[in-house]
Amino acid sequence: MSLLIVHCSCAADGSADRIARALVEEHLAACVSLLPGVRSTFRWQGKMHTDDEVLMLIKTTRERYPALASRLLELHPYELPEIIAVDVSAAHPPYAAWVEHEVGVS
């Protein structure tokens, strides 16, 4: 199975909606689920930060990941966005087939 779920956090400023739409329209993702209400605490450039964010759960395939990651870097407002791909070890076969169809994998 070649399915991936890509985690990417984004500012809670509406940019996640724009990114999600672009990724689905460009067939880089079959679906992007937006989870608002994420609060991230991190150190950036030597300073502590706590920011409200939206977590994007992006459903794609291993084959489309390089293009998806490249496009995320173009669209994302952060200097260093979180882009973490997690392998899906099991999925409902019709759902997996739908994801593969939507991102153009036969």
Image (cartoon, grey):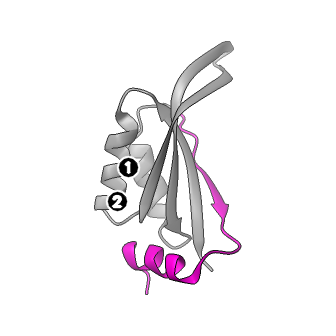
User: Could you say whether the residue bearing mark 1 is in a helix, strand or loop?
Assistant: helix
Q: Residues within 10 Å of mark 2 (few under 14, many from 20)?
A: some
With respect to residue 28, does 102 lie above or below? below
Side (left or right) of 62 relative to 104: right
Which stretch is magenta?
A: 80-106
For image coordinates 58% across by 71% down, the residue present is 3
Q: Which of the pair 2/91 is nearer the observer?
A: 91
| Figure quadrant of residue 86 | bottom right
Residue 89: give x, y in percent of width and height: 71, 72
Report the amino acid beneath label 2: Val
Q: Which residue is mark 1?
A: 20
Q: Position of residue 105 (x, y in %)?
A: 43, 81
> Which residue shows up at 35% across the image and 41% down it?
17
Are the residues flagged by discs 2 and 1 in contact, CB closer than 8 Å? yes
Instruction: Give above or below for 11 relative to 88.
Output: above
Residue 101 magenta = yes
| Residue 83 to residue 25: above or below | above
Q: Secondary structure at mark 2?
A: helix
Give the position of the C terminus as an image quadrant: bottom left
Q: CA distance from mark 2 to mark 1?
A: 6 Å
Disc 2 target residue: 24
